[in-house]
Every structure is written in structure tokens, then in C-alpha cells.
Amino acid sequence: MKKIILSAFACLLAFGVSAQGKWGIQAGANFTDLKLSEVSMSDDMFSRATGYSAGLTYDINLPLGLGINTGLLFIQRKVESEVAQLGGDGSKTFENRYSSLELPLNVKYRFMLPVVTPFIIAGPYLDCGLWAKQDGRKMDYGDDLERFTWGMTVGAGVDVFRHIRVMYQYDWGLTDLSAREAMDNITTKPRSQRLTLGILF
């Protein structure tokens, strides 16, 4: 899957040289949950925390309102976990941070209106982990986490005067974030809601 997405992205960039496309920058907040395969553990172990995203976005416009949305984004996802202290002496809250580069590849449909251009997007993304920490302790890729993961995105937004973009999206992580040895065969998959503001050039 990673090779397919990377190959498609390279083809899109080559095509974008001659196609009608538009670059932009975007940034915003994301709100992440971690869903475990053991449903009874999922709500007890992790709670949502606020992270952020920032980076480049690129649209390739096609006929009939269709298009491709891609880019390269830095993502920091955060969740909190509450762990009981030994001896029954209350609990302690840990903050988990996962920083990565994300490569989206979305199909886009635009509703062509005079001043505003609403749109919807859907497609896969590839995530490459950069670094991660649990309560300040560095987590290792390979031992604790998988470096490459992927998922699916759906979203909607609006371009105002074709230069200001406001967008909401929901990301489903479809591969296990934790290394197999780390969680005793319990899968951990991120679910993120994201609000972003962008400027198109």
C-alpha cells in the first residue's frame, strides 16, 4: 500500500506541472482518540487531547468539478492515558505525543459557485512516524510503534474567493500504531477529527 501511494503521488506531481493546479499552506488543530481492539479497554485507557497540523497542500483541478488534493503535512497527535498508581494511591495521567509526516491522496469534488467554492474530499493517507513520547519518555519505532501506517480520510470544506480555505476532516487509522510485541496482539488505531485554515496561492 505504501508503494502504491508513493508511486501515485509521484505521478500526480509530474502531471501537476502541466495541469491547472494550486499550492497552499494550511494549519489547524486535531482531536485524536486511540481505539483498541479490546473494546472494554478502549474507553478506559485513552482520552482525547488536542494536537496540531501544518504543512503544504496542493490541488490539481480536473474537468466537471473533479480534482485531486494532496500535499505534505507535519502532524502531532496527542492522547492522554490514566494509569492507576501502585498501592491504590490514586492515578496518574500520561500524555502521549505522536509526531509524523502525512501524505494524503484525496479525490475532490467542487461545487462551483461565484464567491465560495464548497467541496468534499475522500481518500487514503500514508503516515511516516518521526518521533513519539509518552510522558516525556521517548518511544522507539520497531519496539514500541510502527513507523509507517495508513488510513482513510473524508472531509468537507469551502474556498472563499479561491484563496482562503476552511476545512473539516475525519481520519480513520486502518493499521496498528503499536508494534506487535508491545501490546500483546491488541491493535491500536488512531481516529482524528481535524479543523484547518489554509491560504491558497
Image (tube, rainbow, N blue to C red):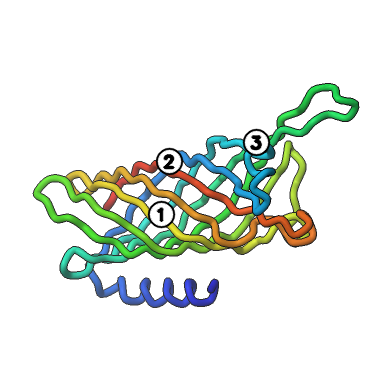
- The percent position of residue 130, horizontal first and vertical second, equals 63, 55
Q: Position of residue 20 (x, y in %)?
A: 22, 67
The answer to whether 159 is drawn above or below residue 129 in the figure is above
Q: Are marks 1 and 2 in contact (CB under 8 Å)?
A: no
Residue for badge 2: 28
Type of amino acid under label 3: Glu
Amino acid of disc 1: Leu
Q: Which numbered dot is residue 199? A: none
Which label lies toward us, 1 or 2?
2
Image point (57%, 50%), residue name = 190
What residue is disc 1 on? Answer: 56
- Classify mark 2: helix, strand or loop: strand
Which numbered marker is on residue 80?
3
Q: Nearer the viewer, residue 48 or 165?
A: 48
Label 1 vs 2, first from the N-terminus = 2
How many residues crowd around disc 3 within 10 Å: few (fewer than 14), some, or many (20 or more)?
many
**Residue at horizontal 74 percent and vertical 49 percent from the top:** 139
Crowd tier of the residue under label 1, counting other residues whose Cα lies within 10 Å: few below 14, some 14–19, many 20 or above:
some
Farthest front residue? 40
